[in-house]
């Protein structure tokens, strides 16, 4: 009986030992699981923290990049503005340079024109070539223009003034010829004779000389001095026998005799 009790107690103790060992094993497994979970949570937290840090760094870098990009855009815009300003200055300088060059050209042209007014020019009148001042040329042509218009009073005054103003001019023999013709048209026959004779005295070989002699005879005829006219016509035929004026003189002589 006692032996049976001892066996029962031993069995109970063995069972208790087995239960305790099992409980201890289960408790150990729970601690390991908790530690694993904690480790996993810690790693996840570390990863999350690392991801957050990387995200912050990326965000900061993105913000810095945006600021840099904005600064770069501002610099580009400033450069564009500066380039536009420089282009505007360049265009303004180009316009000013063109204006200066145009003014210089106008000034040079003006100086050249003024100098040309005083520089002698080569002219050819009645088959004779000579040098004349521009003013001299203008005045002669103005007087001749008045004669051609039939304004003989103005032509007489202009040619008389020209003859006084330019006594050594190459135009002078021709001017005396047209002055005499203007006087003839104005019926100033004696004045015309004086100027025709002045032409002949100054330039007896002038192409207008035969016409001047014939014109003297015409003036003498108008003055009713036929005797003098015949002598003048005879002198014309003798002095210039091949001239057209000589042909006209022979015809006049036939009528006067």
Image (cartoon, rainbow, N blue to C red):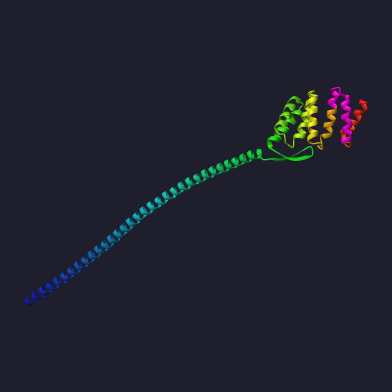
Magenta span contains residue 102: no
Q: Is any part of residue 148 visible from this angle?
A: no
Quadrant including the C terminus: top right
Q: Is residue 81 above or below residue 186?
A: below
Image location (x, y in percent) of residue 150 = 77, 26
Per the picture, the main secondary structure of the magenta-coloured stretch is helix
Q: Residue at x 71, y 31 (%)?
A: 164
Image location (x, y in percent) of residue 15 = 15, 72
Image location (x, y in percent) of residue 7 = 10, 76
The front one of 181 and 200 is 200
The front one of 130 and 96 is 130
Q: Is residue 169 left or right of residue 247?
A: left
Q: Magenta region: which residues?
A: 218-239
Which residue of the protein is positioned furthest toward the left in this rendering? Answer: 2
Q: Is residue 80 above or below residue 25?
A: above
Which residue of the protein is positioned furthest toward the bottom in this rendering? Answer: 3
Q: Is residue 228 above or below residue 22?
A: above
Q: Residue at x 53, y 42 (%)?
A: 96
Q: Residue at x 88, y 29 (%)?
A: 231
Residue 133: quadrant of the picture: top right
Residue 113: quadrant of the picture: top right
């Amino acid at each position: 009986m006692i032996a049976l009790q001892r066996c029962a107690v031993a069995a109970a103790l063995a069972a208790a030992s087995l239960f305790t060992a099992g409980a201890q094993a289960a408790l150990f497994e729970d601690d390991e699981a908790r530690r694993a979970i904690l480790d996993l949570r810690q790693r996840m937290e570390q990863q999350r923290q690392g991801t957050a840090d990387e995200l912050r760094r990326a965000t900061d870098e993105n913000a810095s990049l945006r600021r840099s990009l904005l600064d770069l855009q501002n610099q580009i815009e400033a450069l564009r503005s500066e380039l536009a300003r420089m282009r505007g200055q360049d265009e303004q300088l180009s316009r000013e340079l063109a204006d200066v060059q145009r003014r210089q050209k106008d000034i040079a042209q003006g100086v050249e024109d003024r100098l040309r007014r005083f520089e002698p020019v080569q002219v050819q009148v009645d088959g004779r070539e000579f040098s004349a001042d521009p003013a001299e040329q203008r005045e002669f042509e103005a007087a001749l223009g008045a004669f051609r218009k039939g304004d003989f009073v103005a032509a007489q005054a202009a040619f008389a003034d020209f003859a006084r103003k330019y006594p050594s001019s190459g135009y002078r023999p021709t001017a005396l010829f047209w002055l005499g013709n203007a006087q003839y048209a104005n019926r100033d026959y004696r004045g015309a004779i004086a100027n025709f004779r002045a032409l002949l005295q100054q330039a007896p070989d002038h192409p207008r000389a035969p016409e001047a002699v014939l014109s003297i005879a015409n003036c003498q005829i108008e003055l009713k001095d036929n005797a003098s006219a015949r002598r003048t016509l005879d002198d014309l035929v003798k002095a210039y026998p091949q001239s057209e004026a000589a042909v006209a003189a022979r015809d006049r002589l036939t009528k006067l005799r």
